[in-house]
Image (cartoon, rainbow, N blue to C red):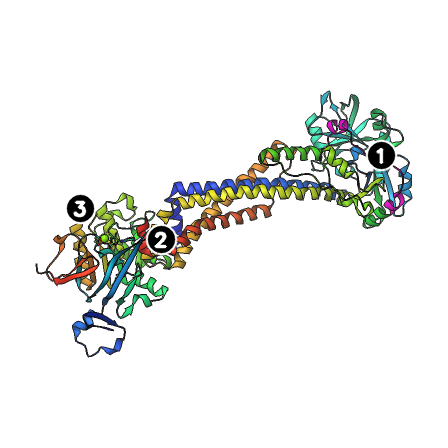
Amino acid sequence: MRFVEDDGVWKCEIKMNENHHDNSTNEEQQFLAVRDLEKIHMRGETQVPALRGLSCAFEKGSFNFVLGPSGSGKSTLLYLLGALDDPSAGEVCFQGQSLDSLTEPQRDHYRREQVGFIFQSFNLLKTLNAVDNVLVPFLPQGISADLRQRAVDLLKQVGLEHRLEHHPHHLSGGEQQRVAIARALLKKPELVLADEPTGELDSESGAEVFRYLRQLHEEQQTTVIVVTHDERYLEKADRLLHLADGRLLREDVHNG
Amino acid sequence: MFRFALSNLLNRKARSTLALLGLTVAIAGMVGLFSIVEGLDRITEESFSRIPGILVMQTGAPIPLFSRLPAEWGEDLKKVEGVKIVCPEIWVRVNVLEGKMILNPPRFLLGVDVELWNALSHALYRDDLVEGRFLNNDDIGTRNVVLSESIQREMKLKLGESFSLNGEDATLVGVYETGSILIDVTIIMDIGSVREQARFDPTAVSAYYVEAVDDDLNEEVIEDIRDVFRGRKGDRWVPTSSVLSIEENPLETMIEGLDRWLKSASSASPPQLSEEPKSSSEPLDVSPAEDKIVTEDDLEIEERLQVDESIPIDVQTADTWGEKFGDFMSELDFIMFILTSIGMTIAALGVVNTMLMSVSERIIEIGILKANGWSKKHVLSLISYESGILGFGGGCLGCLFGWIATLIVNVSFPDRVELYASPQLLCFSLFFSIVLGLLAGLYPAIWAMRMMPMDAIRRG
Ligand SMILES: Nc1ncnc2c1ncn2[C@@H]1O[C@H](COP(=O)(O)OP(=O)(O)O)[C@@H](O)[C@H]1O
Ligand SMILES: [Mg+2]
């Protein structure tokens, strides 16, 4: 698969062995790509267009920010990237595969094994303690002692060693988000999607969250895409995508 | 997974408790209602299956107490081929025992021909003796009696003790126990003594109990007896309101009580307990076995009396007589079924409502699970576990409480009712509870599962 600009439109070609002659940057661009993405939400009878033909690509191992005013379609984009929603038109390609073309089990696998999603409102399960919340993706398969140990280690890594058995309502917002991060990291994802992960946190907890995301990105070359309002957390060489009104306004690289 | 389901339930105590309570009440109610029917069925079956012979009564009489037959017909019965023994019986109601009026449960005095009764190869009461002795030839002309253990207990009588029976002294010589509340209401005495005390028409008896040379011949003997008596002139039993208001029999008392209870329970239109009147145009085709026990309603009894007028006697095995009661039971079964269905529906709605109460919470949760890569199958099995546990728990508790309730009722009113919750009933109730729980749990789940995870998460 490759992305070619053709009359100003990005095309996602799903032919794996066609692009061996392409240069290395092109190879990396194929990790995650979006083409002509449209999404229309229904609010009762009225149609609310959230994305109006958006095309862009994300390189493997990059750290990306999606910026833009409220209502510009940032969350919608992220949900589509994570296969948590279906686009109205256009497509999302992950490693050359259109998410649309995946079978139901393949989609489940994509959500379970390849993408770690971090929500603004944490979305932990109220009835489970911290460790079990981290283990949620793998509960149906049965939890090995190794995996459980890994979950505990991850929680220790995010500074929650004294909160392992606590239920979400006994945890602060920052602690809940750290549990959610541990949950996203347990699967060793290739892609982490975070929708305003610091939106409900104080600045100290927010900085902490970004510390873990940076650490993950550096240690495992995970591709990270973060939606945020807060420009404080930008660092040099981060890629920035500016959205407005459901379209890509511009994209650039942050330079400190 | 199972642990997750359990922790979901335990961490939503209010919801789980409500759902469990709803199920428990529903299932306990179901067990209770059906145990009444089963109890009646079982009593009847037990009571009548222990009487192997043939009952001969006046046509139209619902029970021997109301029946009158000429005394000399015993000779004619004896002559029928295959008949071994014909025992005349006189049935009288016991109104006063030890100076106390007897209303409920009723008691009956049965006068038997002691010699003939002892000649039967199987004889009710005689074969059920638990203490003392049955009447023998020495008791002829005396006021010695045999009565049931429950009457003995009630009157605190010892063997050999005398007590007052309908105003005259009687002496206890034996105690029997059949365990059936329909049978253990009888006090047995020599037929001559009963006749004398009750000033019973000397040319009449109440009924005959006929033993054939072989129980297997019963059906043929019954047909032969009918042939002999067909066309013979005899009085039909006609109810008088005085008889009906004073005389009660245990069946009727029970039915009446149930009827009243049912009517009060279902404040709606009263259930139709009555039989359907049979067409009287072909009286010969109507076998008495198909008749049903009547309620005390005069009108209905009269309708019933238009049946088989050509035979003045009603001949059938005790089993068949029991089946008549069974037919009535099945009508009762049907009413119970309707009542229970209404109860179940209300309970099911309650359970579903409890489950739906938290549906938005549930939808978010399912959205989160799906966002974490749970397949539909996994979500379904989680919900099934949860609802299954609720259904099973509610079912077990319901069965337990229902069963305990039947035991309490049985112990509290040992001589009046006998409720029976059979293992089958309990199993069915448990099964029903699980199904109910699953349906209530799966409904919101299937709904939530059709949504994309994002829609589900945003919905909350
Ligand atoms: N599930 C939904 N139903 C209806 N409208 C929605 C839904 N999700 C988003 N929208 C609308 O789509 C537009 C873009 O939303 P969103 O992607 O959440 O923007 P952002 O995250 O940039 O604030 C907004 O106008 C929002 O109201
Ligand atoms: Mg948003």
Image position, residue B232 (x, y; %): 89, 40
Rendered position, A178 above or below A114: above
* Residue bounds of the magenta highlight: B224-249
Callout 2 amino acid = Ile
Rendering quarter of residue B343: top right
**Residue beneath label 3, please?**
A202
Are there few (<14), some (14-19), or many (20+) residues within 10 Å of tag 3?
few
The quadrant of the picture occupied by the N terminus of chain A is bottom left
Give the number of the disc on residue B114.
1
Image mark count: 3
Q: CA distance from mark 3 to mark 1?
A: 101 Å
Is the residue marked by circle 1 packed among few (<14), some (14-19), or many (20+) residues within 10 Å?
Answer: many
Q: Are marks 3 and 1 in contact (CB under 8 Å)?
A: no
Same chain for the residues at labels 2 and 1, yes or no? Answer: yes
Check disc 1 and report its element: helix, strand or loop: helix
- Report, in whole angstroms, how far the alpha carbon at label 2 lies from the one at label 3: 29 Å
The correct choice, above or below, for A157 with respect to B119 in the image is below
Give the percent coordinates (x, y) of residue A61: 19, 65
Q: Is residue A110 left or right of residue B347?
A: left
- Residue A136 picture location, percent across and down: 32, 55
Q: Residue B366: which disc?
A: 2
Looking at the image, which is closer to me, A178 or A47?
A47
Q: Tell which residue pokes out farthest to the left in this image.
A: A256
B246 within the magenta span: yes
Position of residue B155 in the picture relative to residue A68 (left or right): right
Residue appearing at x 23%, y 45% in the figure: A172
Q: Amino acid at mark 1?
A: Val
